[in-house]
Each structure stands twice: as C-alpha cells, then as structure tokens.
C-alpha cells in the first residue's frame, strides 16, 4: 500500500463531497454506485503498486493514472451528482460544451508536452498533484454537458465524436514516434518490462484504444438514441399526415339551409 496524497486526501475528499451533495433528498442506487466506483478508481490508482511504477519506472503506468483521472472517474462522479444540485450548476460557464471540450483538450495536450511532463515527475510533491487535479477538474467539465446538458442526443453525439477525434492523435503519436520522447522514463531504472521505446508504444496504443472504447462507445450510444428519436418523430408525423386526409374526406352531416327554420313539434 502506498499512501499518496491522492489516495489519502483526494479520494476521501471526493467521497465526503458526494455524501454532502446527497443530503436533502433521496439518491438512486445507480448514482450511489457510480459515485462509489468513481472514488474507488481514484483510490486504487494511487494506493496500489501502480503509484511507484508511474512515478519511477513506466510511462504506461502514469498514463493509466491520467486516464483514470481525466476520463473514467469524472464521468462516474458526474453521474453521481443529484439532479437537483446539477440543475443549480447548469449555468456554470466551464460546463458549456464550447468551453469544456477545449479546456479538457488543452489540459491533456499541455501536460503531455515532454518538458512539462518531466518537470511534473521531478516534483512529485507539488506540481504532479497540480497535474492530477487539473485532469480531474477538466474531466468533470468535459462530461458534464453529456450527462446534464439540455442539447439533443444528436448534438451530444457530435460533441463526443469531436472529443474522440481531437484526443486520439495524442496516443497515436506516442505509439508511432520512433524514439522515446520523455527523458525521465528514458533514464528510469528498469529491472523488468519493456525498454523506453516499447514502454512508450504500449502507453500510446493503450491510450488510443481506451479513448476509442470510452468516447466512441458513448458517441455510438447517443447516435443510436438520436436515430431512434428521429424514427419515432417521423412515425408520429407520418401518422398525423395519414389521418389528416381521412378527416378531410369524411362526409359531413346534413346541414340546414340558410334561413330555414327548425321544424315545430
């Protein structure tokens, strides 16, 4: 067990925050489960052997931690927010799609620049924590419009597809560049596992595959919902248009001639 700041500080803080947010009304079991799994992922990523591997030996381990903080945990934490609280936060500027997505991409690409990446690893008790908090905050922002946004299913599908297309090149570049680009891991002591270039290629392929699974999978789900909504709307319109001619063709009842009097009894 490795008692990192994220394991003994961040994960408990997230759990307390979700508990406070759940006060004042019933919370579904699904939301409770999402919050518990999200907190557990953060805790596991920084309390297990993954923590020393990420900080001292392997790039793939560090990227796995980053993925947990920037993608997996945020969507679960957002799902755990009660709707009444989400409604209050709906107007927050950073939760708007055209703000959240660029913010998340900037965070992802900036922290993966080699000199910034290495500097953070050489300051594990300060700058590295800032990196992790940045990933988590940006991840919450990028998932918020998907879970609580008022846009149509088609707009959400386009948003997720844009996130997938714009984020995927990072992992692909890391996998295809023919040399190791992070000096910290080039000079890291290794007693087992792949060398620096193989480590980077594994990290890049894993990152690209994970983003395809998460974002493209979510995109496919919203696209199917959009198509189902369109089909239902088209069927409703077709039904209305079919009933309209029938109503117009229905014979009207006998009408009294203008000026005629009603028969007396």
Image (cartoon, rainbow, N blue to C red):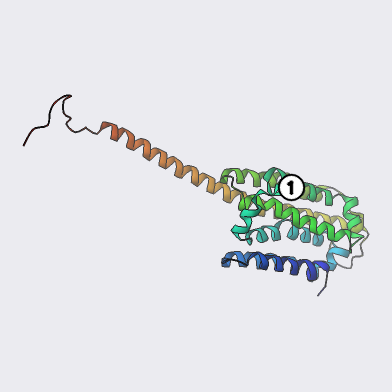
**In the image, residue 248 above or below residue 134:** above
**In the image, residue 32 above or below residue 227:** below
**Which of the pair 251/198 is nearer the observer?**
251
User: From the image, which quarter does the N terminus lie in?
Assistant: bottom right
Query: Taking 233 as reference, is 128 left or right?
Result: right
User: From the image, which quarter does the C terminus lie in?
Assistant: top left
Q: Could you tell me which secondary element the residue under label 1 belongs to?
A: helix
Residue 39 image position (x, y, % from top left): 70, 66
Q: Is residue 134 visible?
A: yes
Name the residue carrying label 1.
167
Q: Residues within 10 Å of mark 1 (few under 14, many from 20)?
A: many
Residue 27 image position (x, y, % from top left): 58, 66
Q: Is residue 195 visible?
A: no
Residue 43 image position (x, y, % from top left): 75, 69
Query: Taking 171 as reference, is 20 left or right?
Result: left
**Which of the pair 194/232 is nearer the observer?**
232
Which quadrant of the view contains residue 191?
Answer: bottom right
Residue 118 image position (x, y, % from top left): 90, 55
Q: How many marks?
A: 1
Which residue is depicted at the point 77% across and 50% down? 171
Which quadrant of the view contains residue 201?
Answer: bottom right
Which residue is depicted at the point 57% across and 51% down? 221
| Residue sitting at the far left | 265
| Residue sitting at the far right | 187
Query: Taking 222 as reference, is 203 left or right?
Result: right
Which residue is depicted at the point 60% across and 66% down? 24
**Which of the pair 125/226 is nearer the observer?**
125
**In the image, residue 221 above or below residue 242:** below
Which residue is depicted at the point 70% across and 51% down? 142
């Amino acid at each position: 067990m490795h008692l990192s700041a994220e394991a003994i500080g961040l994960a408990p803080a997230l759990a307390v925050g979700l508990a406070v947010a759940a006060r004042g009304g019933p919370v579904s079991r699904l939301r409770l489960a999402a919050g518990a799994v999200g907190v557990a992922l953060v805790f596991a990523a920084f309390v297990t052997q993954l923590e020393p591997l990420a900080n001292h030996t392997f790039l793939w381990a560090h990227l796995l931690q980053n993925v947990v903080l920037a993608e997996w945990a945020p969507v679960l934490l957002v799902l755990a927010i009660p709707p009444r609280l989400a409604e209050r936060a709906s107007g927050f500027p950073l939760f708007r799609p055209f703000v959240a997505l660029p913010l998340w991409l900037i965070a992802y690409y900036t922290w993966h620049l080699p000199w910034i990446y290495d500097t953070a690893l050489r300051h594990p008790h300060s700058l590295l924590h800032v990196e992790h908090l940045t990933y988590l905050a940006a991840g919450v922002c990028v998932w918020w419009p998907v879970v609580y946004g008022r846009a149509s299913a088609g707009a959400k599908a386009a948003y997720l597809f844009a996130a997938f297309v714009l984020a995927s090149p990072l992992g692909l570049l890391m996998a295809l560049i023919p040399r190791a680009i992070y000096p910290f891991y080039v000079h890291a002591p290794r007693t087992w596992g792949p060398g620096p270039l193989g480590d980077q290629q594994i990290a890049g392929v894993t990152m690209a595959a994970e983003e395809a699974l998460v974002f493209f999978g979510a995109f496919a789900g919203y696209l199917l919902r959009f198509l189902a909504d369109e089909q239902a709307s088209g069927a409703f319109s077709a039904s209305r248009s079919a009933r309209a001619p029938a109503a117009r063709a229905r014979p009207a009842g006998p009408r009294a001639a203008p000026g005629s009097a009603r028969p007396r009894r």
